[in-house]
Image (tube, rainbow, N blue to C red):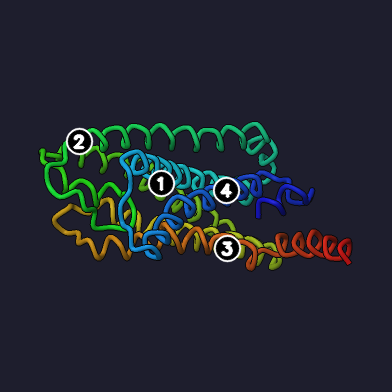
């Protein structure tokens, strides 16, 4: 997806620039957890250094928070394109698109850094065996030998800020979009709008649902098994499925694949 958007001029639009960043985040997201998990599984070694724990935690949280904000930016892009098409070149200019991208990365990194530093400075007097396949905050908090209710409240607020509020914004945007699409006269326009929106909503559902369910529940209602099953969705399945969903359900991307890889094959031949 990143290569297609970079080399095909027809995909040089705000929507696809945002999509290229989503693809990059997914690539980094899955690279943060899967290689170490696979290494542990194949070798039988299940330890990680203190520095490695901090690095994995930082990048995992950065990708999760940044992706939540980026998905909200993509929903706003579709809202403006469908509901205010005449204002689209102004509201979604290249500079505005760049600000959205930089803002998503910056806010996600700052939030991740603050949580990582705090978690690494919590005293752990119980077993340091984390019942998870990654260094996720809900799995590390029970190991602390101090009262963590204040920090758990901070995690709750952070989840609301970076996941719940963007999700509510996305829901409101697409509610307005679907209302506008319903009143369109052009059947072709309706079909194209529904295809684009349904693709994005599929990605949003896969990403937000397990994250919010995991991080907004009280610790007393969570179990390690449930947390690990839900984590598979937002650490492995969602990053893996996003490029497939966007390529198979998007005619413009399929056309770019035909042009780019068709040209490549012809050149090689």
Of mark 4 and mark 3, the one earlier in the sequence is 4
Q: Secondary structure at mark 4?
A: helix
Q: Find residue 201 and report its horizontal and vertical position in percent.
A: 50, 60
Q: Is 4 on the left or on the right of 166, as rendered?
A: right
Q: Residue at x 39, y 40 (%)?
A: 55
Of mark 2 and mark 4, the one earlier in the sequence is 4
Mark 2–mark 1 Cα distance, whole angstroms, equals: 19 Å
Q: Secondary structure at mark 1?
A: helix
In-front residue for pair 258/120? 120
In-front residue for pair 145/43? 43
Q: Find residue 234 and report its horizontal and vertical position in percent.
A: 41, 58
The disc placed on residue 60 is: 1
Q: Find residue 262 and report its horizontal and vertical position in percent.
A: 82, 65
Q: Which residue is under mark 4?
A: 24
In-front residue for pair 177/62? 62
User: Which mark is in front, 4 or 3?
Assistant: 4
Mark 2–mark 4 Cα distance, whole angstroms, equals: 32 Å
Mark 1–mark 4 Cα distance, whole angstroms, equals: 13 Å
Q: Within 10 angstroms of label 4, few (less than 14), some, or many (20 or more) residues?
A: some
């Amino acid at each position: 997806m990143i290569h297609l958007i970079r080399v095909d001029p027809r995909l040089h639009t705000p929507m696809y620039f945002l999509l290229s960043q989503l693809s990059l985040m997914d690539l980094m997201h899955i690279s943060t957890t899967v290689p170490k998990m696979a290494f542990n599984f194949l070798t039988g070694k299940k330890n990680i250094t203190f520095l490695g724990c901090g690095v994995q935690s930082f990048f995992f949280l950065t990708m999760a928070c940044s992706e939540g904000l980026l998905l909200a930016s993509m929903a706003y892009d579709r809202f403006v394109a469908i509901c205010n098409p005449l204002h689209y070149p102004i509201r979604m200019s290249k500079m505005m698109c760049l600000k959205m991208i930089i803002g998503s990365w910056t806010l996600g990194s700052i939030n991740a850094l603050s949580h990582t530093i705090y978690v690494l400075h919590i005293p752990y007097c119980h077993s340091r065996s984390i019942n998870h396949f990654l260094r996720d905050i809900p799995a590390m908090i029970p190991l602390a030998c101090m009262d963590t209710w204040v920090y758990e409240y901070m995690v709750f607020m952070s989840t609301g800020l970076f996941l719940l509020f963007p999700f509510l914004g996305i829901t409101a945007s697409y509610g307005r979009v679907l209302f506008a699409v319903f009143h369109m006269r052009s059947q072709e326009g309706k079909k194209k709008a529904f295809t684009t929106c349904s693709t994005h909503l599929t990605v949003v559902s896969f990403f937000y649902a397990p994250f919010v369910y995991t991080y907004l529940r009280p610790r007393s209602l969570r179990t390690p098994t449930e947390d690990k099953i839900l984590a598979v969705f937002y650490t492995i399945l969602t990053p893996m499925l996003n490029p497939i969903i966007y390529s198979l359900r998007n005619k413009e991307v399929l056309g770019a694949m035909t042009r780019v890889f068709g040209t490549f094959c012809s050149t090689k031949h």
